[in-house]
Image (spheres, helix red, strand yellow):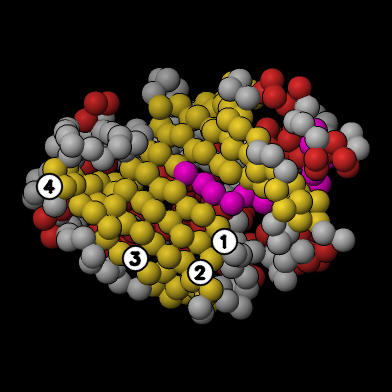
Amino acid sequence: MSEADTLTGEVPQEVRGWIGQKRYEQEGEFDVERGYIYTSCASVENGSPLFWDEKAANEITSGWIAPPSMISVWFRPHAFAPNRTGTAQPLQVHFDLKEKLDLPEAIMTDNTIVFRDPVRPGDRLRTWQVLRSVSEPKTTKLGTGRFWVIDVEYVNQKGESVGTESYTGFGYKRQT
Amino acid sequence: MERVLTIDQVKPGAELPELGYDVTATTVVLGALASRDWRPMHHDRDFAQIRNGTRDIFLNTPNQAAWFERYLTDWTGPYGRLGRMKFRMRDSVFPGDRMVFRGRVDAVHTDDAGCGWADVTVKLSVGDKLCTECTARIALPTAAGDNPWTRRGERWKPDAEVGTASARR
């Protein structure tokens, strides 16, 4: 794709076809577990008794839960896995858009999360991604590119929704 | 006995206690690793500068979500249950920055399922620079003995619009 197509032309038909489609449905590679919960809490010095005090967790949340804001953590692929070829990316639709629109750099600008049933250690979650929109070309202080919105749905092993995330990304070429 | 902040104790316009934190490279890297985010702009300064055009590595999105959750539940205590959170990142947070969280209650209401909600705006700033603005809806007990964490299905509506069915205070 030429630069003119990327930055002034229409969104390719293949990309338009992704809008509204459920893509990359997958099960988490491992069960929700407390080791990561401790690490997340430590990273922000979150001392809530829900994550550190079993008695409080039993009384208030009927057992251990994960911090709701960790919802996306359970799906980010590790940096290495045996037999994997290529680089596994979180939020694959975001990286597909970068490639198909020939926009080498990207950042996230907005993130909306709706939290439903609590996530608990031992849960095995499922997720999928839906591209909602791709903007016309825009120029910001970072460069020229396009904004896009991707929804990510999360359910537990019983099929119950545990949350939905919506990301706004901006893919761009740096100003030269 | 855990502290219980009930919805009747919260009024629109109320300010949340301020939280200040000195960010280091370890803050950024630990936050990225805790959220399984291996992308180099969160641990490799050369990459961040050359590829992203930023002055240093910077806090990643899911770790900012964790900071906002911690800030909000420091205020509510453990009975506070996050329903919805939206944030917009306007500028990045870098090692060497002192980030400051400030929050304000925008509205307090009870939905048609009887769940009490506080709508709060939280601003993450570095000096005079607003880096991220977060709007959150967090459920609080309506009275002693009420526990938002027991709500499920039709009794838990974190994404419902606030309308006439809600009693706004």
Amino acid on which disc 4 is placed: Thr
| Mark positioned earlier in the residue sequence (1 or 4) | 1
* Whether residue A54 can be seen here: no
Dot 2, how many residues are within 10 Å of its Cα: few (below 14), some (14-19), or many (20+)?
some
* Whether residue B151 can be seen here: yes
**Residue B133, percent across and down?**
46, 60
| Residue for badge 3 | B103
* Badge 4 and badge 3 in a common chain: yes
Measure the C-alpha gap from mark 3 to mark 1: 17 Å
| Mark positioned earlier in the residue sequence (3 or 2) | 3
Measure the C-alpha gap from mark 4 to mark 3: 21 Å
| Residue for badge 2 | B130
Amino acid on which disc 1 is placed: Arg
- Residue in the picture at 68% in, 32% down: A93
The disc numbered 1 marks a residue on which chain?
B
Q: Are marks 2 and 1 in contact (CB under 8 Å)?
A: yes
Left or right: residue A50 versus residue A91 is left
Dot 3, how many residues are within 10 Å of its Cα: few (below 14), some (14-19), or many (20+)?
many
Dot 1, how many residues are within 10 Å of its Cα: few (below 14), some (14-19), or many (20+)?
few
Q: Which mark is residue B142?
A: 4
Q: Quadrant of the N terminus of chain A?
A: top right
The disc numbered 4 marks a residue on which chain?
B
Q: Which mark is residue B90?
A: 1
Q: Main secondary structure of the magenta part?
A: strand
Q: Are marks 3 and 1 in contact (CB under 8 Å)?
A: no
- Residue in the picture at 54% in, 49% down: A110
- Residue in the picture at 72% in, 66% down: B54
Which of the 4 quarters of the picture holds residue B4?
Answer: bottom left
Q: Are marks 3 and 2 in contact (CB under 8 Å)?
A: no
